[in-house]
Image: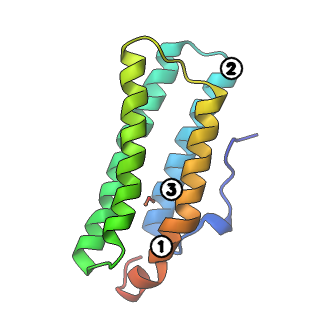
């Protein structure tokens, strides 16, 4: 069973963004599966790096829309993005130093962070961006 199951509650009502969130969820689930299967640390690190790169790209997509349409909550939203990027970068640094292994605790952190961010912070832009014709 996947760690995170996509459901309509997670939809922000904008297809392009839902598709990106689904991709992030799939990557987190793939990482969780690899961990459960006992895959080598190099495999886990590779998936984690891919997840980090794609997540940064997704944040950039949202932030470009905020800038384009003048979203009032831009700064607070960007702060949350930056906080996650900082935490992920620190984990990557520890991995490179060889003193970090992906664990159930890390997976719980990723799941918690992503679902909270989508359900609270991302959901708050729906009405505004839909009113601007973003789909
Ligand atoms: Fe979908 Fe604000 O990240």
The N terminus - image quarter: top right
Q: Which mark is residue 118?
A: none
Indicate the position of residue 11 as horizontal and vertical percent values.
Answer: 58, 68
Kindly identify which residue carries mark 3: 21
The crowding category of the residue bearing disc 3, from other C-alpha atoms within 10 Å (few below 14, some 14 to 19, many at least 20), is many
Q: Counting residues from the N terminus, which is met first, the one under dot 3 or under dot 2?
A: 3
Q: Is the residue marked 3 within 8 Å of ligand 1, measured from its CB?
A: yes
**With respect to residue 38, does 47 lie above or below?**
below
Within 10 Å of the Cα at label 1, are there few (<14), some (14-19), or many (20+) other Cα atoms?
A: some
**x and y percent of residue 62 in the render?**
35, 64
* Whole-percent x, y for residue 100 in the image: 49, 17
- Residue of label 1: 14
Q: CA distance from mark 2 to mark 1?
A: 34 Å
Q: Residue furthest right?
A: 1
* Horizontal arrangement in the rendering, residue 4 relative to residue 30 (left or right): right
Q: How far apart are the alpha carbons under marks 3 and 2?
A: 24 Å
């Amino acid at each position: 069973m996947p760690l995170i199951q996509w459901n309509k509650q997670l939809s922000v009502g904008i297809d392009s963004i839902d598709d990106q969130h689904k991709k992030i969820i799939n990557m987190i689930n793939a990482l969780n599966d690899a961990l459960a299967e006992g895959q080598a640390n190099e495999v886990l690190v590779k998936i984690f790096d891919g997840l980090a790169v794609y997540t940064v790209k997704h944040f950039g997509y949202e932030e470009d829309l905020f800038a384009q349409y003048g979203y009032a909550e831009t700064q607070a939203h960007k702060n949350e993005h930056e906080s996650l990027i900082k935490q992920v970068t620190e984990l990557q640094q520890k991995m490179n130093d060889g003193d970090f292994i992906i664990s159930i605790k890390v997976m719980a952190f990723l799941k918690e962070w992503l679902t909270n961010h989508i359900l609270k912070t991302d959901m708050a832009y729906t009405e505004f961006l839909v009113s601007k014709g973003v789909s």
